[in-house]
């Protein structure tokens, strides 16, 4: 709703009231109409102040309403009505003015913001464009280049930048409300014509075409295949070249096209699932609602390799004091230097005062951890070493200290067996670089207590990460699903494809990088080490093992051979690609002839592998593993899997996540294709459709949000 009150000085105050973010629901829009009409008709009122309850102006249109039939008055005529008012309307921007919220403020004649406020036309992040006049008013207000950037990225703009750009008229450190009321009194009675943005012309650079072309190039790099940012560019072009009314028509046409697109649906799904992941539950009845997290006043990180350094920076950035532990003086010194320079860069970039960072101390002595509330072990993936550390921690740390391991796939229960209090052992799987990546898999072993889960999830929130609770199995959710995906990529090379062909298909699907580029970036030796550990290659491999088979299943030794010949990826200048210039991947003729030799050595008939086959075999095998994970109860819901993939594995947001994508493609089609590929490759068990997928198809392929109920009938590992 919107509350109306008249205050001394002939001012009407209209307060948007729809907790938690004052979204413009049907009821709110109706109330705005009514109250603005009342204020304009009231002879006693000379100016109107529009604000939001609880220190937030407005979080935009109500996203929940997008999936329902449209009811109530639309936004566009409502905002036009405000702009047409003869009485000045002053928007008070506190907290946020996002999407339709900022568009509403742009319809007002003046905008006064609190210094802590943020504004933005965020619709593009939901697969839409600012279709309540935002694409037409913002370029008129601040010029085409700045508006283009804000509209196509959806980025949050601070109040300081907003006043510099001219989006708001004034910023104040004190009460924006009081400032706005006083200001409204000074402009009461003035003609409002010059303040109506619809009557302005957008300041436009001479080289408009090259500006727009440049934006499209950046969009293709950033979010290949996404429709909304491209539509945003078209709408801004309309603002630059057409009268307001025609520009608005174009905006509406583009919105109608986006609104019904699968991409908008996928991105809105991502918005809600990301928030839902915080509401974790376990089958024992423990949940975010009934389990209290322990306070974390001091933390420790063991191991200052790539992951440990990033974790220490993340903790410090959240204001948590950290003790960083290494085993050797040399490593400790190098770690300290790297962490300190990362923190300096961070504070410069984010404008964080040193005082807000948690202090970091460095030590070789584990006994210094006796007062820590939480320890994160981030040493090599070596079970014996990890067990040794957890055993020592048990004797050094306080009995209630939470002991976390950053393993990316080892058995949490086995690690916990070395601790005297296994219920306080939990996996906190960070993603590299740990101070940048948003995802945190919180791995719950069979003995992990609810309080340990709650504390790790609370930590994720403090670190501004997205925590997702998963069960204990090799690779957990994310890395486990990657295995069949990468295996298919190797098999496709064996059968005739080239790395650049596979990568191109995946990049056109929307991944920022294809799988072979990713492997070159992270280093081929990472997977090699774990295959050696598992006895799939290297000294532990039983003599006489067939080169392309392990345990009766197909195996590709291709990555092992590359590693053995010193091709470890970018760091050695060659891997699946050649890197003559730093980080620039070029197809390598050597690899091409190596693959030809390899195929003839093993009698493989090379064939032309089509793009559909590349995409389907890579993605459907990954999705199939997702269904197995659901069936085994390793993930609580398909939504959790999707959050993991979108926030940790570069799955394109406009495709929702692997499980959502499977549903969009059609579960019967996924099943049919998996059956087909399994028939043609019976030695690849990963291609055999999971029984969960079959069950869902048999039940008529219900939408993703209904799968959870079916999954609960299976056992859960959480
Ligand atoms: C026909 C259309 C014509 C015109 C175009 C206009 C389009 C739009 O306006 S689209 C919406 C644009 N708005 C946004 O993109 C803002 C989205 N929200 C946020 O970014 C954040 O929620 C926030 C910064 C506003 C607040 O962040 P925070 O304090 O961290 O809280 P949460 O994100 O956890 O949100 C709390 C709660 O509110 C729900 N919610 C937030 N925004 C909306 C919204 N616009 N519509 C509906 N619901 C919203 C969010 O889902 C959370 O709900 P739960 O507690 O149930 O999870």
Image (cartoon, rainbow, N blue to C red):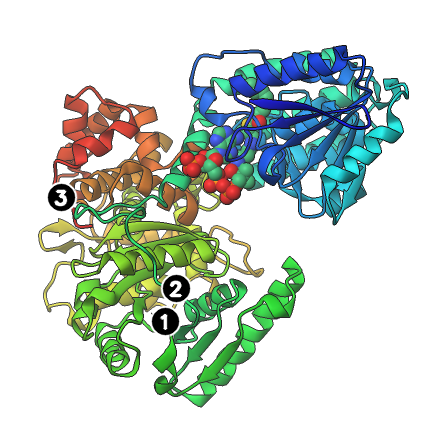
Q: Residue at x 38, y 88 (%)?
A: 365
Q: Please state the horizontal and vertical placement of residue 44, each as a whole percent of the image.
A: 80, 16
Q: Please state the horizontal and vertical placement of residue 418, each as a whole percent of the image.
A: 18, 75
Name the residue carrying label 1. Answer: 373
Circle 2 crowding by C-alpha within 10 Å: few under 14, some 14–19, many from 20: few
Circle number at residue 492: none
Circle number at residue 683: 3
Pair 2/3: label in front? 2
In the rendered structure, the answer to whether residue 618 lies left or right of residue 653 reads: left
Tell me the distance, in whole angstroms, between the alpha carbons under discs 3 and 1.
49 Å
Q: Is residue 334 above or below residue 137?
A: below
- Please name whichever residue, 692 or 376, is drawn nearer the observer in this view of the structure: 376
Marked residue nearer the N-terminal end (2 or 1): 2
Tell me the distance, in whole angstroms, between the alpha carbons under discs 2 and 3.
51 Å
Q: Is residue 144 above or below residue 115?
A: above
* Residue lying farthest to the right in this orientation: 190
For residue 686, what is the image quadrant?
A: top left
């Amino acid at each position: 709703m919107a509350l109306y009150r008249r205050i001394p000085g002939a001012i009407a105050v209209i307060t948007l009231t729809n907790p938690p973010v004052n979204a413009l629901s049907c009821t709110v829009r109706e109330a705005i109409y009514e109250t603005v009409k009342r204020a304009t008709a009231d002879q006693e009122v000379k100016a109107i102040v529009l604000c939001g309850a609880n220190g937030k102006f407005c979080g935009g249109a109500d996203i929940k309403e997008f999936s329902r039939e449209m009811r109530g008055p639309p936004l566009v005529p409502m905002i036009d009505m405000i702009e047409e008012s003869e009485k000045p309307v002053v928007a008070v921007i506190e907290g946020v003015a996002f999407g339709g919220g900022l568009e509403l403020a742009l319809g007002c004649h003046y905008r006064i913001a609190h210094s802590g406020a943020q504004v933005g036309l965020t619709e593009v992040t939901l697969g839409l464009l600012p279709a309540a006049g935002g694409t037409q008013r913002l370029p008129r207000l601040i010029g085409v280049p700045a508006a283009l950037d804000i509209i196509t990225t959806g980025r949050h703009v601070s109040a300081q930048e907003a006043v510099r750009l001219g989006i708001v008229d004034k910023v104040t450190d004190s009460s924006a409300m009081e400032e706005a009321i006083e200001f409204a009194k000074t402009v009461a009675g003035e003609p409002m014509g010059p303040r109506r943005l619809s009557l302005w012309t957008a300041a436009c650079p001479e080289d408009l075409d090259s500006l727009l072309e440049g934006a499209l190039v950046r969009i293709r790099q950033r979010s290949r295949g996404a429709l909304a940012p491209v539509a945003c560019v078209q709408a801004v072009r309309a603002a630059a070249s057409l009268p307001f009314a025609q520009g608005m028509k174009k905006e509406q046409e583009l919105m109608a096209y986006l609104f019904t697109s699968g991409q908008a649906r996928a991105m809105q799904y991502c918005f809600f699932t990301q928030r839902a992941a915080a509401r974790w539950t376990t089958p024992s009845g423990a949940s975010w609602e009934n389990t209290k997290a322990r306070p974390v006043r001091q933390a420790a990180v063991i191991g200052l390799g790539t992951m440990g350094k990033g974790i220490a920076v993340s903790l410090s950035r959240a204001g948590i004091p950290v003790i960083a532990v290494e085993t050797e003086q040399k490593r400790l010194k190098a770690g300290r230097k790297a962490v300190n320079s990362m923190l300096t860069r961070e504070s410069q970039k984010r404008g964080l005062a040193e005082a807000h960072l948690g202090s970091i101390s460095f030590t070789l002595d584990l006994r210094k951890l006796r007062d820590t509330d939480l320890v994160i072990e981030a040493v090599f993936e070596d079970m014996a070493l990890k067990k040794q550390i957890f055993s020592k921690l048990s004797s050094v740390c306080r009995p209630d200290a939470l002991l976390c391991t950053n393993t990316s796939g080892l058995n949490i229960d086995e690690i916990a067996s070395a601790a005297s209090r296994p219920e306080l052992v939990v996996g906190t799987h960070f993603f590299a670089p740990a101070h940048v990546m948003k995802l945190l898999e919180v791995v719950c072993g069979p003995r992990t207590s609810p309080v340990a889960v709650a504390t790790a999830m609370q930590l994720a929130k403090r670190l501004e990460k997205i925590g997702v609770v998963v069960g204990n199995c090799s690779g957990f959710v994310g890395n486990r699903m990657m295995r069949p995906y990468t295996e298919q990529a190797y098999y496709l090379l064996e059968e005739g494809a080239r790395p650049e062909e596979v990568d191109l298909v995946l990049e056109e699907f929307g991944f920022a990088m294809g799988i072979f580029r990713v492997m070159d970036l992270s280093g081929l030796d990472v997977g090699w080490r774990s295959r050696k550990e598992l006895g799939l290659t290297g000294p532990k491999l039983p003599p006489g093992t067939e080169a392309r088979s392990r345990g009766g299943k197909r195996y590709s030794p291709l990555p092992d051979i590359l590693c053995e010949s010193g091709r470890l990826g970018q760091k050695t200048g060659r891997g699946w690609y050649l890197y003559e210039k730093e980080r620039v991947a070029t197809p390598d003729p050597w690899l091409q002839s190596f693959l030809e030799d390899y195929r003839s050595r093993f009698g493989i008939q090379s064939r032309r592998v089509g793009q559909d086959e590349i995409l389907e075999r890579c993605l459907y095998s990954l999705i199939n593993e997702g269904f197995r994970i659901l069936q085994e109860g390793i993930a609580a819901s398909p939504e959790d899997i999707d959050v993991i993939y979108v926030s940790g594995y570069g799955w394109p947001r406009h495709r929702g996540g692997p499980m959502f994508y499977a549903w969009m493609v059609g579960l019967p089609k996924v099943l049919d294709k998996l059956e087909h590929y399994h028939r043609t490759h019976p030695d690849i068990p990963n291609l055999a459709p999971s029984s969960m997928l079959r069950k869902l198809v048999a039940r008529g392929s219900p939408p993703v949000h209904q799968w959870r109920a079916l999954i609960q009938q299976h056992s859960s590992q959480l």
